Amino acid sequence: MSNNSEGMLDKKSFFVSTILDWETVNYRQFPWRNLKDNPFGVLVAEILLIQTFAEKVAPVYSLLMQLYPTAYDLASAQVNAVEDVIRPLGLTYRASQLVSMSNVLIDKYSGKVPDDYDELIELRGVGSYVACSTLCFGFSRRVPIIDANVERVIGRFFDLQWPIRDARTRREMQKLVGQLLPLKHFQEYNYGLIDFAALVCRHRRPNCGNCYLLRNCSSTRWLA
Ligand code: SF4
């Protein structure tokens, strides 16, 4: 193995173990996290989290789940009533998505969330990120999760083009994200990436001065 390959392996292991270590101290508890046997709750949360800060979603999610805890409850809800609950988040079109998605869950899956990527992605309002998050956090499946925030952290650390502008880099990013996913503790690692992107390697003004990854990061130009 060349020195370069060994260096890359070391860098990957350092990245994964550091994110896991960091997450043990900085894990953010939200009402949709570590839900046991409730993939429906995870799925609804992931839809609400699209383009919205988690802190803002938390009280809305809690109220929504209190009023409509199952697909049967949400399927029979008035869209207007659901809109009223999620209005503080904006993007109220998600109310009709949630109601119609719940109806499909009842019609096709007896009110349960399917444990299958291809079936999940067919549901209204569910894209790749929501499907992967639901599989990982709702079904404990070892699935990598990629969104713009994860791409930013990995792009900066490994010096991959970010924001991604071409198909080749996208493939490279997907491959790398998959390689990094640990065999064990993959849920903690995926939560860790999400939290780290939100709190440390932020879009604007990343906190490089207090970053556990700093000594091996390829993007220290962010240091003021
Ligand atoms: S050193 Fe800065 S750019 Fe690198 S991972 Fe940490 S916060 Fe992100």
Image (spheres, rainbow, N blue to C red):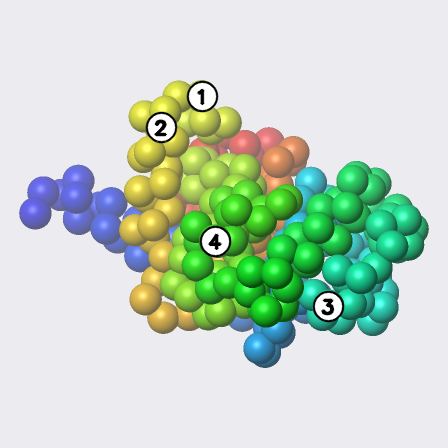
Q: Position of residue 188 (x, y in %)?
A: 49, 66
The amino acid sitting under disc 4 is Glu
The amino acid sitting under disc 2 is Thr
The Cα atoms of the two marked residues, 4 and 3, are separated by 19 Å
Give me the residue at 55% from left, 43% from top.
127
Residue highlighted by disc 4: 119
As drawn, the label of residue 219 is: none
N-terminal of the pair, mark 2 or mark 3, is: 3
- Callout 2: few (<14), some (14-19), or many (20+) C-alpha neighbours within 10 Å? some
Residue highlighted by disc 1: 165
Q: Nearer the viewer, mark 2 or mark 4?
A: 4
- Vertically, is 129 above or below 172? below
Give me the residue at 9% from left, 42% from top.
2
- Vertically, is 202 above or below 111? above
Instruction: Residue 38: name its quadrant.
Output: bottom right
The Cα atoms of the two marked residues, 2 and 3, are separated by 42 Å
Residue highlighted by disc 2: 169
Question: Does the image show residue 149?
Answer: yes
- Vertically, is 117 above or below 91? below
Give me the residue at 77% from left, 46% from top.
96
Give the farthest residue toward the top.
165
N-terminal of the pair, mark 1 or mark 4, is: 4
Circle 4: element type: helix
N-terminal of the pair, mark 1 or mark 3, is: 3
As drawn, the label of residue 72 is: 3
154 or 42, nearer to the observer: 42
N-terminal of the pair, mark 2 or mark 4, is: 4
Image quadrant occupied by the C terminus: top right
- Callout 1: few (<14), some (14-19), or many (20+) C-alpha neighbours within 10 Å? few
